[in-house]
Amino acid sequence: MTRPRVIFINRVYWPSLAATSQLLTDLAEGLAARGWPVHIIAAGHEAGPRNDVIIHRTGEGDRHGGLISRARNYTRFIRQVRRELETLVQPGDRVVVMTDPPLLGAAVTPVAVKRGAQVIHWTQDIYPEIVAAHFGALAGALLFPLRARRDAAWRAAGRCVVLGETMAGTVKGHGVPADRVITIANWAPRELHRPSTEEARFAQRAAWGLADKFVVAYSGNLGRVHEFKAILGAADILRDRPDIAFLFLGTGARLAEVRSIATKTRLRNLHILPPAPRENLAASLASADVQLVTLNPAFAPLVYPSKLAGVLAAGRPTIFVGPPDGEIASLLKNGNCGAAVAPSDGPGLAQLITRWQADPVESTRIAQNARDIHKKHFVFESALARWEDALV
């Protein structure tokens, strides 16, 4: 069977270490290894082929500064992508559009459809609703024309791939037929498929200076869609427990806020360190006794915290700070691999942490279940097979 060409579009790709870059690199190279002709359009200068993937670069860098600089870079990137598509796309191609920059799909779908390609939207997060959820109803009203263009692009696509069922409901609610909405979870980094050794975990905890602590960690981006009130509240409640430490490993828009609160309230049991490099991610995630995943309820229909996949792959008991009756809370409960607390429930989080700290047998059982749930829902090979079906 002759497979159609697949053209992925995203602002970042290898060698960038951004999350969407790593996901796209995994998928593109996985498809190429199975015989699919794969092209990438991304920012930067490292054109190629690489591992049988043909890379087309738009020339500008993949980094940006402030809001104005970001808007200019996004505009230039989109303009270059449209020009590239005018010459690259052939009838029957599959053009897979990601969401970096936001609303990229709305800008390029008409060009790809006009040239006879089938468009697939790979939606990592849903804009402009995220902006409206952050800034309020007035922002939502001002952004309504952008939403209308986005909706039209979704409806013109052959497929819309989303990360979770709640996101799928949002896309369907904007007029996309249910049979064109496909849920494919993001996978855990493949370095996490093999459990970290006890020696690596011990060395990592020693490097943190927390070898003798019960470590409760948040690993990854501290972004605007995440929620930290309960974590900071639990750290405050447990400030007199020298055997329990809270650890933030990451960067992001809310890092300064978290650091400021920790300093002002003198939370000496809360430690903030840079994120782990991908090659050390397995040991880093596995070295905490509990991993935290958070989500502001206002963003629950719009994003899916993909760090959950890595946490479960590392075999860590997980506490979800977010909607306690939502999709992620249900997954943890049904899989007996974690628990959920409401976003403002610092006392409930503190109580759960102390219970697991006092009962290592329960913690070990939950950790074992976490690996099972990872294998069931978040393995790359399963996602790759589902992507092959979506591309046919």
Image: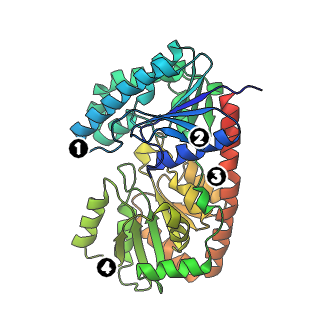
Would you say the residues marked 1 and 2 are in contact, meaning their CB atoms lie under 8 Å apart? no
Q: Position of residue 278 (x, y in %)?
A: 50, 61
Q: Name the residue under label 4.
A: 268
In the depicted view, which residue is nearer to us: 282 or 357?
282
Q: From the image, state whether disc 4 or disc 1 is nearer to you.
A: 1
Amino acid, disc 4: Arg
Q: Where is residue 321 in the image (x, y as percent from the top left)?
A: 46, 59
Q: Earlier in the sequence, mark 3 or mark 2?
A: 2
Q: Name the residue under label 1.
A: 66
Question: Marks 3/2: CA distance?
Answer: 17 Å
- Badge 1, how many Cα within 10 Å: few under 14, some, many 20+? few
Question: Marks 1/2: CA distance?
Answer: 30 Å
Q: Which of marks 3 and 1 is nearer the N terminus?
A: 1
Residue 48, compared with residue 75, is above or below; it is below
Would you say the residues marked 4 and 1 are in contact, meaning their CB atoms lie under 8 Å apart? no
Q: Mark 3 points at which residue?
A: 378
Residue 90, compared with residue 236, is above or below; it is above
Q: Earlier in the sequence, mark 4 or mark 1?
A: 1
On the rendered image, what quadrant is the N terminus found in?
A: top right
Regarding residue 233, the answer to whether it shows in the image is: yes
Element marked by disc 1: loop
